[in-house]
Image (tube, rainbow, N blue to C red):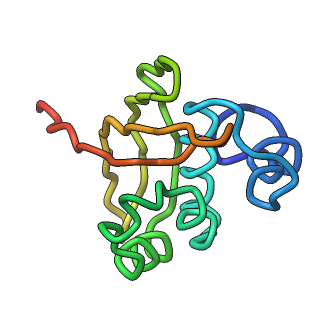
Amino acid sequence: MKCPCGSEKNYSQCCGLYHSGVETAPTAEALMRSRYSAFAKNQMQYLRDTTDPQTLDSIDDEANKEWAERAKFLKLEIIKAEEKGTKGTVEFKAFYNVDDEDFVHHEVSTFRKQAGEWFFKSGKIKAEKK
């Protein structure tokens, strides 16, 4: 089965390695991709585990779970990914469908590397121009 993150690899050889805890994501972009796949596979604990402990309280677990259960995730498009030392930024578009209506979630996410492991810090939604 292909990985939801769009890598063209099998899930078990891609984000499945991170979801199972066999490996940790080596880059901010890999973490972003694995978090998208976690939404697609409803792996809510992985989302908590890979969120920066300093910002974990700002995450609405119930809303994330409800969205992941209702949405059909179609594809992930990485627009830009950068890393500078222990900081990373990934701009992406997540394409999904809810109740037969297509949506695009466009976000710039920030990441922080701590003790050799990447964590999601925050995300800022970018408005889509029509």
Report the number of numbered marks. 0
Along the line of sight, the residue nearer the viewer: 117 or 7: 117
Taking 20 as reference, is 120 above or below it? Answer: above
**Image coordinates for residue 31, horizontal then vertical, percent:** 60, 42
Taking 38 as reference, is 79 above or below it? Answer: above
Quadrant of the rendered structure where residue 21 is? bottom right
Along the line of sight, the residue nearer the viewer: 5 or 90: 90
- Left or right of 26: which side holds 75? left
**Image coordinates for residue 101, horizontal then vertical, percent:** 31, 60
**Given the current orientation, which residue lies at the most extreme front position?**
115
Identified at 75% across, 45% down, the residue is 24
**Image coordinates for residue 84, horizontal then vertical, percent:** 47, 17
- Left or right of 8: which side holds 31? left
Identified at 76% across, 51% down, the residue is 18
Position of the C terminus by quadrant: top left
- Left or right of 4: which side holds 119? left
**Image coordinates for residue 88, horizontal then vertical, percent:** 46, 28
Along the line of sight, the residue nearer the viewer: 21 or 8: 21
Identified at 81% across, 35% down, the residue is 9
- Left or right of 53: which side holds 129? left
